[in-house]
Image (cartoon, rainbow, N blue to C red):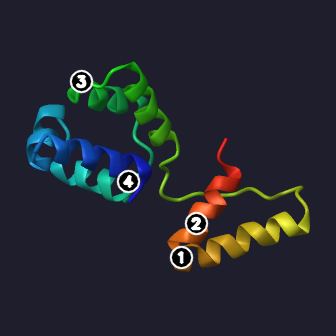
């Protein structure tokens, strides 16, 4: 699940809105919306992000946060290490190999190091 998908699910659950109902209201398929929530689809288009923000009546800051989460929610990330040091290339490759097995505490510590 992506950060965007998790937030959409959280918003939907908080208002007790069924996935099928939301999909119909947004004129998208339930399969697409489900795949987006679960991180099986690419980053959502900006128009859909704003449509979802409007659907939930999000205010300015909340809508901006939803847009930020959408930007961070590409489920298949490519890291271009061309021209970088061997250590940086190794780091990218080791992270790709081990990310699914990292304990939550390690992920949180790593995120704390690199978040702005």
Instruction: Give the SS element for disc 1.
Output: loop
Q: How much space separates mark 1 and mark 4, taking CA atoms?
A: 25 Å
Q: Which residue is mark 3?
A: 57
Q: Residue at x 26, y 24 (%)?
A: 54
Instruction: Give the SS element for disc 4.
Output: loop
Q: Earlier in the sequence, mark 1 or mark 4?
A: 4
Q: Determine which of the numbered discs, if any, sits on residue 103 in the image.
A: 1
User: Relative to 74, is 27 above or below?
Assistant: above
Of tags 4 and 2, the one toward the viewer is 2
Left or right: where does residue 60 sit relative to residue 99? Answer: left
Q: How much space separates mark 4 and mark 3, taking CA atoms?
A: 24 Å
Q: Earlier in the sequence, mark 1 or mark 3?
A: 3
Q: Which residue is mark 4?
A: 41
Q: How much space separates mark 2 and mark 1, taking CA atoms?
A: 7 Å
User: Relative to 69, is 38 above or below?
Assistant: below
Q: Residue at x 21, y 28 (%)?
A: 55
* Of the pair 6 and 111, the residue shown nearer to us: 111
Q: How much space separates mark 4 and mark 2, taking CA atoms?
A: 23 Å
Q: Earlier in the sequence, mark 2 or mark 3?
A: 3
Q: Earlier in the sequence, mark 4 or mark 2?
A: 4
Instruction: Give the SS element for disc 3.
Output: loop
Q: Which residue is mark 2?
A: 107
């Amino acid at each position: 699940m992506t950060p965007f998908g998790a937030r959409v699910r959280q918003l939907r659950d908080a208002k007790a809105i069924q996935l099928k109902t939301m999909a119909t209201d947004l004129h998208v398929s339930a399969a697409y919306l489900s795949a987006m929530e679960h991180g099986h689809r690419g980053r959502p288009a900006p128009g859909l992000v704003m449509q979802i923000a409007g659907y939930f009546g999000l205010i300015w800051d909340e809508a901006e946060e939803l847009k930020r989460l959408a930007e961070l929610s590409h489920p298949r990330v490519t890291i271009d290490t061309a021209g970088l040091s061997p250590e940086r290339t190794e780091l990218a490759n080791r992270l790709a190999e081990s990310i699914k097995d990292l304990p939550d505490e390690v992920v949180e510590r790593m995120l704390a190091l690199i978040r702005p």
